[in-house]
Amino acid sequence: MEKKVILMVEDNPKDEALTLRALRKSNIANEVVVTRDGVEALDYLFATGSYNGRDLREMPQVVLLDLKLPKVDGLQVLEAIRADERTRRLPVVIFTSSGEEEDLVKSYNLGANSYVRKPVDFEQFLEATRQLGLYWLVLNQVAPNE
Amino acid sequence: MSENRRQLGQMRLLLERAGYTVLTAADAGAAFALAQGESPDIIISEVGAQPMGSIDICRRMRAHAGLGATPILLIIDRHHQARLAAELQAEADDYLEAPFEALHLVTKVAQLIERRRTREAVGASEARFHQVIERAPNGMVMVDSEGKIALVNTQIENLFGYSRDELIGESIEKLVPARFRSGHTAYRSSFLSAPTARPMGAGRDLYGLRKDGSEFPVEIGLNPLETEQGMMVLGTIVDITERKRIEETLRSSQEQLAGIIRSAMDAIITADGEQRIILFNAAAERMFRCPASSALGQPLDRFIPARFRAKHADHIRAFGQTGTTTRAMAGSRAVYGLRADGQEFPIEASISQLESDHQKFYTVIMRDISERDHTMQALRASEARFSIAFNASPISSVIATLDEGRYVAANDTFLSLTGYSREEVIGRTSADLGIWPTPQARAEAVAWLQREGRIRNRETRYRMKGGELRTFLTSAEIIELDGKPHMITASIDITERKRAEEVLREQAQMLDLAPVLIRDLEGHLMFWNTGAEQMYGWAEHEAIAQVSHDLLRTEFPQPLEEINAAVFVAGHWEGEMVHTRRDGGRIVVASHWMLHKNEQGEPTAIVEVNNDITERKHIEEEVRRLNEELEQRVAERTAQLQAANRELEAFSYSVSHDLRAPLRHINGFSQALLEDYADRLDDEGKGYLQEVRDASREMAQLIDDLLQLARVTRSEMRSETVSLSEVAHAVIADLRKRDAGRNVRVQIADGLVTHGDKRLLQVMLSNLLGNAWKFTARREQAEITFEQTRQAGEAVYFVRDNGAGFDMAYVNKLFGAFQRLHSGKEFEGTGIGLATVQRIVRRHGGRVWAEGQVNAGATFYFTLADFREHKHGEESDLNG
């Protein structure tokens, strides 16, 4: 079985680089699709815009969603995912710099599966990424797509 | 007189022989002159050739005062003058026809002289009769057989008010009251049928009728009189008005006396000189249990016990010989009576004597005092009771002599009220103590008491021992003690009530200042008080009869019909309206209308009480305006604050989100450099990169701490029960996990529970315990304690460690943000933790302070007000 992709929604290229590095160092071999704002993320998920024609049957194993995004922000993206029948069971992990309680509460209220604050220390960042990969890519059973 | 000398001589001879003295005259002129001078007993005149001469002389003599009564005998010639006889007879007393017998002449002369004498005698008698009647002290009236009044005297005129002329010839019934008239007429005729002198109407009251219609009682005596005019009745009438009155008075006073004797409570017995009972009244019957019929005529000593009888008779006789009319019997000794049934009983008696028609009478008045003995005992008991009641009475009571106010008794209430002791009062006068505010005050009260017999609830002021004047309601009576009049006084202290009344009165006066107007149902003003005058400016006479709403140009808050409807239904109405004063000023009034009804319950008028609230309305308006301004300002401020808060939140968000990202990148890429290019860096280079990574980590911590501090300040607080012990255990557990190599002995007291925001309290304790953990890092045996103590009744928590401590000189820098007492080399930290602790404690209404010593540990104390939900509520209110 071909490994499913990881959808990363991240506008900051440095964070993108560090996250990809961390994933690589955690021996996660899944393809990572990077979208740089909310609109692009939703285009990918619903095969619209620049992703027009993408096979909608192929859904990511997990979505790593930053909150602070240009155009459409992370919470709106989450809301859109949960509002659509095709994506509403998609595992979404909020992966953000914010430690604000408000963000945390809102995210879970909108149906986030997990909320991980990006640690400043890279060793911790690496550990977090590793555990994320282990859990969401290996241990977690995804709901069947009918 | 005769013209015929021979005949004249012949008659003279005849008459002289018969013993008469005869004077002769030859003609009429001589005869008249002679008659005037001699006043003869009879005049004999021959009617001569000129018969008219004889008639003339008759007439002249008749007209003459002195001769009018002298009888005249005419001698007429039988043959020539018979026809003149009738005419002559009318003028003269008698006539004789010549020739006549000598004897005939003498007889005729004697008859005539005798008749004249008789007539004169009768005339004198009648005159005397009239005089007697006139001078009689009683009214006298003579009535003829037909009942016509023939004669009345002056007394009758006076009695009946008629003049003589009004009565003579009138019926006697004119003087009789109408109701008796018919009876009187019948009586009159029956009297005449058997006329005897007697009093009229024996046994009946008779009344006279005066001209003015009034009646008066009379007594009448009747005397029949045989007169020339026939049977007459002479009535004697006496006015007995006065006598009746006296009789009436006498009768009633006799009745009174008899009544008194009859009904007297005291037994009254009168005895004659032989001491035989002649009067025995009803009380005596009761007292001696003997009917009067059995007592009368009996000796007086029958009612005296046998052993006293002899002495008693002596006493009475001895009394009879003194001039004394009345005295008490036996002096102070007891006297005893003896009842018909043989029982003896004590009496009190007085005796009086009266001499009448040389007869002595003794009257004894007695009173049974056996009851009184009982009464005296009862009185003594009652006095004892009175004494107790007097002393125990809660009403201030005193007894003092009436004349000078010398106290003979004063009860406990009086003493405690006035402040005097009994010794200070008894025997001294009210003037000595100065009880009355002025001597006049007492004099007035005493005068009142003597006049009215008692005083009831008279408001009086008395001076207390301390000088204070207090007001009392006083009642007083006069009582007799040891034969002297005393004043017993009971007084209730109403000083406080008076003060309350004073306040009420003041309030009433203030009320009087409230403008009051009364108008009839058409709105015409009927009443306009001083308050209204002052408020509106119109005087009473200007306002009365004006239509109220026109005068005041009333601006109603609702249609007048609605207000009137409300007044007529509910009886009153309250509201605000605008009036215009006389000077044109408009005022807002709080108006209270009350419907006035008459006794039949019909509405008659409306009473309106108006208060000028213009000023109040201005103030209210001002307050309202200020409030609005304030609210607006608060709203503006709140909006500004909310904006500031939002900005702060946005800022915090940026800080937490955006500031951390570069640090993460610095750290991440430094790590990447170390990993990927380790072979191209020497140890020093690797060391520098490590410093870069540490710095980024420190900065991240700093940012987190700052965020926390900000959050502590602005976050909303939630109150719940928080176990500080549990929180502390959790914090320590976390620290042990993070720093597993440390050997720290931690002691946490159980059951430290408070109310507060759990999250904030966690932050606080993790800061304090974290510090303790951190500063004991160099101790072989670190010790951390979290316990509670009490200071001045207040729960004081403290966290104590045996770590590095601090210099108390810098204690005031301890709680400032970014203040550090240790270098980062010694102990890592941002210097924000204690500032955060202080803010959390303060937000819980508590205080925090520290004690420490360098290298000897530190103790951080804090208190917490029992923070509950209401704080949260207050904050909500402010924001709302």
Image: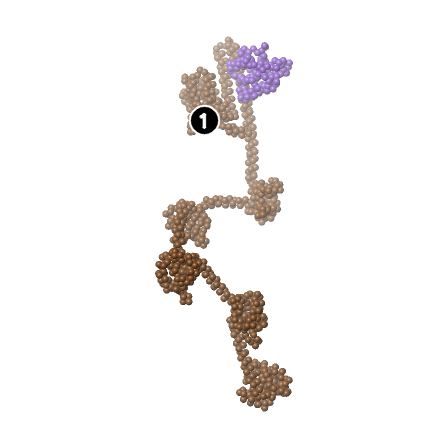
Q: Colour of chain A?
A: purple
Q: Position of residue B832 (x, y in %)?
A: 48, 22
Quadrant where the image shows the N terminus of chain B: bottom right
Residue that mark 1 sits on: B863
Q: Residue at x 55, y 83 (%)?
A: B114
Q: Chain of mark 1?
A: B
- Residue at the far bottom in the pictured view: B6
Q: Which chain is brown?
A: B
The relative height of residue B825 versus residue B865 in the rendered view (above or below) is above
Q: Position of residue B401 (x, y in %)?
A: 40, 52
Tag 1: amino acid: Thr
Q: Residue at x 54, y 30 (%)?
A: B877
**B636 or B426, nearer to the observer:** B426
Q: Position of residue B120 (x, y in %)?
A: 54, 80
**B542 or B178, nearer to the observer:** B178
- In the figure, residue B111 lies in which quadrant? bottom right
Q: Secondary structure at mark 1?
A: loop
